[in-house]
Image (tube, rainbow, N blue to C red):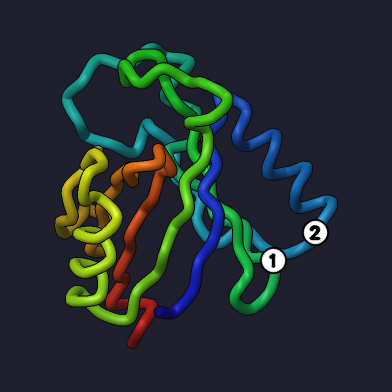
Amino acid sequence: MIGTNTYLHFTGNAQEAFNFYKSVFGGEFKNIQHYKSLDSGKKMLPEDREKLIHITLQISDGISIMASDVLTSMEIPFNAGNNFHICMHTENEQEADRLFGALSAEGKIDMPLNKTFWGAYFGMCRDKFGIQWMINFDNQQSA
């Protein structure tokens, strides 16, 4: 495995929270994407378009935190227990498949492992204990 990081979910204040985290930990923003960048065809409230679909704060080598805003239009209710995932970064797709299969067994697949629009091989699941996982292989980061 390459590493792990924590992925947080917010109800619309991810940017504010990450500005705070940057003031505490230092580091640099490596990736900031807003919902308005999606061409999903789904209707979105105007105020949701400026919210974050993804942000990464690289604190140091090997240490980063990531987040997104959960939109009510996503029909995924925000609860103070589903507002984080453990994200495992793998060295290859086979390792991603193995981890995803083991973690999702007797659990629930929320997003099957697949190639994504941002280029990674990525999936989300919940294990049999209710812990939420993101499995990610990004060939561009491994190269």
Residue at the location (60% across, 55% down)? 65
Q: Nearer the viewer, residue 57 or 39?
A: 57
Residue at the location (38% across, 12% down)? 45
Question: Residue 127 vs residue 20: left or right?
Answer: left
Residue at the location (51% across, 48% down)? 7
Asked if marks 1 and 2 touch (Cβ < 8 Å), the reply is yes
Q: What's the amino acid at mark 2?
A: Phe
Residue 85 higher or lower than 100, as above or below? above
Say which residue label 2 marks: 25
Q: Mark 1: which secondary structure?
A: strand
Neighbor class of circle 2 (other Cα within 10 Å; few <14, some 14-19, many 20+) is few
Q: Quadrant of residue 72?
A: top left
Residue 41, horizontal then vertical, whole percent: 17, 25
Question: Residue 87 vs residue 123: left or right?
Answer: right
Q: Nearer the viewer, residue 76 or 59?
A: 76
Say which residue label 1 marks: 59
Residue 142, horizontal then vertical, whole percent: 36, 83
Residue 102 higher or lower than 37, as above or below? below
Q: What's the amino acid at mark 1?
A: Ile
Question: Residue 108 vs residue 136: left or right?
Answer: left
Mark sitting earlier along the chain (1/2): 2
Residue 82 higher or lower than 140, as above or below? above
Q: Mark 2: which secondary structure?
A: helix
Question: Residue 130 vs residue 64: left or right?
Answer: left
Which quadrant holds the C terminus?
bottom left
Residue 15, horizontal then vertical, whole percent: 63, 37
Report the disc number at residue 79.
Answer: none
Residue 93 higher or lower than 132, as above or below? below
